[in-house]
Each structure stands twice: as C-alpha cells, then as structure tokens.
Amino acid sequence: MKSAPAPADSPAIGQARNTALPDSTECRATGDAQLARFFASALATRSYQTSGMSPDVQVPAGSTLGRWRAQLDSAFKAPGFLAWAKGQGLDTAGMQLDPARGELACIVDGKVRTFTLRDDSGWSDVSRTLLSIARVIAPQPEHGFSYPWPEGKVPLYTVGRFYNQPIDLTPAQAALHRKKLANKALFEFAPSAYASLRSAEALAQQQTALGDDADRHALMTALRSQADDANGSIDLDQVMLQIDPRSSRFASEQRRQMSVAQMLRQDGHKVPVNSQQAQGLALALSFDLAHRAPRANAGGARPIAGLLSATSLRKVRATVVQWHKAQVTHRSNPQAGAGSLLRGLISELPQATRATIASNPASALDQLIRSPKARALGQEIQKKIKVIETPTSVIESVSVALVQELDPGMGKSCFNLAGYNLYQRDNAGYSPATIVKSFITHLERKVGVEAAPLAAQLLLAAAAPEFLIKDIPPNLVYGSHTWANFSIEVSRIEQQVPGASGNMTFSQVMAFGEAPLTSLESEDQLSAASGIAIITWGLANGVIAHKPDHNYTYTDVKRSQEALSKQQKELAWARDTLSAPATTREQLAAAELKRVFPELDPTQKVLQAPWVKHDPVSLLDVYMSGPIKPERWRSLNNKVLPWAAITPRLTQLVPDINQVFSTTLRTIKWRTTVPGPFSLSISFRFYPGRIKRVLNSPRSVLSRCLAPFSIQRPHRDYPGTVQSLYQGFPCTPISSPERPQYKRSRHSKAGMVCS
C-alpha cells in the first residue's frame, strides 16, 4: 500500500488559527468594533501624509475582514496555486490582483506579466476559489489590491472599501475626523450591503471549496506521478491519498485517507490501468469549467428557456405584459421593436454603455440584464414560475423573457432562430463573425439597429453558443471539419456547465477537447453533442439534403458522420505526406550499408584508388557513386575498414543504390504532387459561392491548371481509393453535391481522371 506524499505546508494548518475562533455575530461585532478604532487612527495618520502611500491597518482575526483575510491567505498558499505559480516562474512576493476583472499581475523573468481568464496559462483553472474570496474582500470594479500583506495587517484602502468608508478626506473632513478622535468619539462601521456574501455560511462554503481544490490537486498530482510496472500497468487501489479536512469529501466520508481508485469511482470516473491513461485523466481534471459559469455580476446568463414548460413560458409572457402596462410612456417611438422589453431596458442604460452595444454587445448585455429594472422584473418572473433561488436565478429569469419575446415557442433552433437559419448552405465558407453580422442585419428589421447586437447575443447564447466564443481564428469557417469538431466541444461544455462556453476562448475550448473522455457520462455527452454539429457539416458539404422542417434522421447523421470521418482521414494523410521529410540518396546508401555491415562506420574516409593521387574517400561516398568495384580500391586503415575481409560481402548490397533512389524520388514526387491539390480542393469547398463560380469557370487559369490532373493508380501509402481522393476535386463544380464522374484517361489504360 503506497501513500502519496502530503503537502509540507498545508493551508489547513494555517486555517486552524482562524477556525479556533467561534464565528458568531457577537464575535464579529466585537472584532469589527476593534477594527473600526484601528481604522480611525490609521485614517488620521493618512490625513497628515502627502505621499501616495497609505498605512496598513491592524486587523483583528475575529473581525469580518480578518476572517476573510485568513481565507485569502489560504487561497494563495493552496498547493494548486503554488504549483501553477512555480510553473509560470512567478515572483509571489509582489502581486497585484484585480478580482473584478479576474487578472493577476506579477513579475516573471524580471518583467511585469498580467494573467487573465482568457489566456492559456492555466490561471483560469486554478483561480476560481481564490477570486471568489477576493471578490468578497474587494467587490467593486477598480478595487484591485496588492498582495501579500504584512502579518495581521491589511492596507488602509482595502479596509475602507471593505467597510465602505471614505479614505481620501478633504481638509475640512480630515480636521473633523481628528477632532472626533481626540475627543475619543465612538467609531463604528455602518451595516454593509454585502453582508450576505460575507456571512458565516458563505465563509464556510469558501473553506469547503478550498478543501475540495486541495483534494483535486492532490488527485491530479498522484495521477501524474504514476509509472507503469513491468507489465505496463498501474494499480491505483494501492495508492492512498490524504483527504483535506476542510473538503466536502471529508465531511461525507469522515475518513483521513482514501485510495485514488476509490476517489475516482466515487466521482464517476473510469479508473486508469496504465500511466498514459492516468496522465490523460489528470489533464481532464485540470479543466475548471465551473469557473467559466455566469456569475451574479458578470459573465452572461445561464440559458434556461429550454428547461421550462409551456405553462411556465405563458406565465413569463403574462408577467412581461403586466410590466409593459406599468411603464409610463409619454411619446411614441416609430422604430422597429418600439415598445419591446429589450428596447425598454436599453433605454435605462447609461449613454456610455449604449454607445458600446455595437462594439461589445456581451458587456452591454451583462449590464442590461443586471440593471435595477431588469432585476425587478426577473424577481417577479422568478416568483411566478417558481424558479429555485440562486445567485443568478434573477438574471436567468429576465433573460428568458427577453429570448421568448424575440423568438416565441418552446425550443430554440439554430436552423430557425427568430426566422434566420444560421447553418444555411449559403453561409458555408464564411467565418462565424460574418455569419453573426448577417444575423444582426436580419434582426435589425425586427428590433432596430441599436438593439440588434443585443438580440443576437441573447439568441445565440440560447441556441448556438459556438458563435459567441472569444478569439475565434478568422480563417475558421462554417463547413470545415475543424468547425464541426469545435462545435461539438462547445456543446459538451454547455452540457456540463450551461453558459460557460461564452466565457471561454477558442484555444481553451480546443484544449478541453484534447483531454480524453474520463467517464461513461462524458461519452454520453459526446454522443449527444455531436448530432447538430455533424448534421450542419453534412449540409454545408452537400452530404445530406436540406429539409424544410429541419427534421434530420439517424440515417442523415450516420451518412454525415461517415463522410466527415473519411475527410478527416484524407486530410490527415495529406498533411502527414506533405510534412514527411524527403529521403536522400545518402540516407538510402547509409541504411543499406548498415544492413550488410552493421559493425562498420561507412563514413570513415580511408579508401583510396592506388593509381591516382587524391584525398581519401569513405565507403559511403564510393557506394553512392555507383556499383562498387573492389579491385579499384584499397584501405588506408585496415582496423577501421578491413577491405580484404569485407570484399566477399559486397555482393550482398543492392548493386546500384542510385536506381533505388530514382524509384524513391518518383514516389516522393507523387507524394508531394497529389496531397497539395487534394487539400486545395477541400479548401475550395468553403469559398463563398461567387468566388467558387469564378474559380470553376473554364476561363479560370487555376481551373485549367488543375483539370488535367490525373493519377495512374492508388499509391500504397494512401489509405483510400482514387475515387475517394478526388471526390469534390475542383475540376468538378464544387457547389454540386453529386459525386464526380470518372472516366478512363486517354493516356493510360489503368488511369482515371476526374471530369
């Protein structure tokens, strides 16, 4: 029985000092009162200063801030964060954290580097609990702070922001404050608007989250450390892990140790049987999708329209009708969408926010659905349809109302979203940004120019979130196999954490897709996620026909899947063929000499022709010049090359290596000639229709160059047939879904040419 090593500096130990203090209202009040006096003294000192530096404030451990400060210390000392920081080369002695933006700035290799939730550093996968704690301490935008703090102290600005106290006093305010301090007036903090977020229950939840993070990191570390035995296997039933006493696993199991295999089975994962599987599972566990979920203050909203019954949706509409009646309007608006819920909420936004709708609809929508009027309506809808109250249920409820107004009905389909088919055949070959722009233009007739980007954001989040992923490469187009794979991974993410994909980048989505499936549930998710993506690929590539009712069958899915798999196999072959290094004459000759004379070094220059004076040459040089004639050469060093002894074995060599090279060269020429046009033909399929018609025109230079391209026979290295290779070749009209016809080449009995 093996035990994985426990962290030497466990955060749970440091946490013990704080948990020893009972967390009651009375204890917090006593600590806060003491902190208020310390803060008042520090503020008086600050009022005398002229520099930008503010003093630190002694923070009692039992105060509200003291307890949350202890949680933040534990988060920064968590093994997962420390391992990530070490891997990135962070100088943790001076960090700047912006909780609202989710950014961490620090020194790396002598330069300031800022880590964001959108980069590929892994910061987003280790920072969820840390940032949630930091947002309690600094809940407002622009309230970032430096870290670490002195032992038992917190900077004055952070204390003031936590308790909503002014820091930069005017001269008159400073004089009054010092006078009150001299008169020993009582200082106390006013009740906080964030009291519920800082409660004992919220603190306990964060402590549990820290324990769960520690268990997760220990599990990943154990998996990564596995090495196969002589039989190429591992036994995770014999690997024991310490359970963090703060974690939910410890609370439910009441055990200090558990085997890795038990933990994995308990969490629904398949238990790896070798180190490769263990590494793959560790990679899968490293992704923290929950961190990308919409939050109460930002990040969009979880789409729940598809989860509601017809009755609930009718109640939503009725509530919106009542809301409209309660609004007082003194003037009519002739624009499209006038009087709609969306335009009504837009009118409540600040002018600065409205100015960003076209350029940054995601941010504007975040503010719109979290505005006071939107939240009031969301609360009313939540009561009517009896949605379980969560930190995000109000914004989810108002989002449902907005989506239903834009596209009434039970389901939301990417094939008919407010009357627009995102995956129509005419959109094949266009980037998602271009398709979204076309969708916004369509919506302008319904809701007006200003509201259209917000309407598109709402509808796409509900029916086609793949179009909302950030930083999608501009050369990625609908209809390509990469877009299909990408769409599948987005759908998998949405099944696991609804709304999370909208807060991810393209590279993060694809990195998630590279991790292996770790459970039967994830395999079911993949199967469910693949359907729409495979159908849309088949429609774009003409594999299946468009159906007006968009009711595609299992047969359609199967046909598209087979064609997609075949194209991916062909493209992989073309890529590998084009990237394979060409074999040289020297490599062929050296390999043949090594086969016959494994004990010799054929590159030693010790051969010389006795009848002519010249620099010595190697056996490899002689062999590459043509068939070897032993009587014409002698060795200058019989220890290195015993010429007389090896002469009888020269007949075992291929007589003329140059003939072998010539044959190989023809093969290389074929290999570098065929895959290029094939890959190009695949690319042409996704050109917009007008460009394809020009390229396929008989007058097109490119078309005339490619049309005569033919091949004598299938190459042994190619996994398919000539017919499959040239399906959709540019000399056949690309827009046609029919298979290209093949005829006998005029130049060869066995050859085939695409026509």
Image (spheres, rainbow, N blue to C red):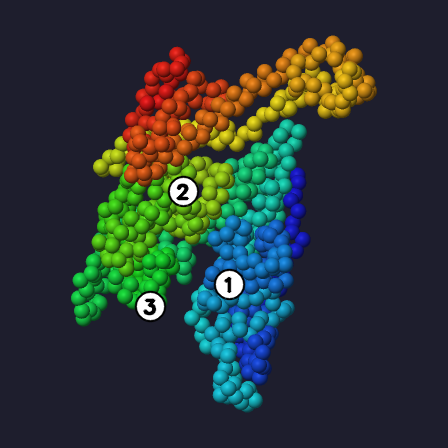
* Residue pictured at 22% horizontal, 67% vertical: 327
Task: Name the side, left or right, on which 656 lies relative to 508.
Answer: right
Element at label 1: strand
Q: Amino acid at mark 2?
A: Leu
Nearer to the camera, 596 or 325: 596
Q: Mark 3 touching mark 1, by CB under 8 A?
A: no
Q: Amino acid at mark 3?
A: Pro
Element at label 3: loop
Whether residue 436 is situated above or below residue 157 in the rendered picture: above
Residue 641 can be seen in this image = no
Task: Name the side, left or right, on which 602 lies relative to 358.
Answer: right
Measure the alpha-carbon separation of dots 2 and 1.
33 Å
First in sequence: mark 3 vs mark 1: 1
Q: Position of residue 620 (x, y in %)?
A: 69, 21
* Residue pictured at 38% horizontal, 28% vertical: 705
Measure the alpha-carbon separation of dots 2 and 3.
36 Å
Task: Please identify the quarter of the rendering in which residue 590 is found.
Answer: top right
Q: Return the residue at label 2.
A: 476
Whether residue 595 is situated above or below residue 423 in the rendered picture: above
Q: Nearer the viewer, mark 3 or mark 1?
A: 3
Q: Return the residue at label 1.
A: 98
Q: Position of residue 458 (x, y in %)?
A: 32, 53
* Residue pictured at 60% horizontal, 71% vertical: 153
Q: Amino acid at mark 1?
A: Asp
* Within-10-Å neighbours for mark 2: few <14, some 14–19, many 20+: some
Label at residue 350: 3
First in sequence: mark 2 vs mark 1: 1
Task: Name the side, left or right, on which 490 lies relative to 545.
Answer: right
First in sequence: mark 2 vs mark 3: 3
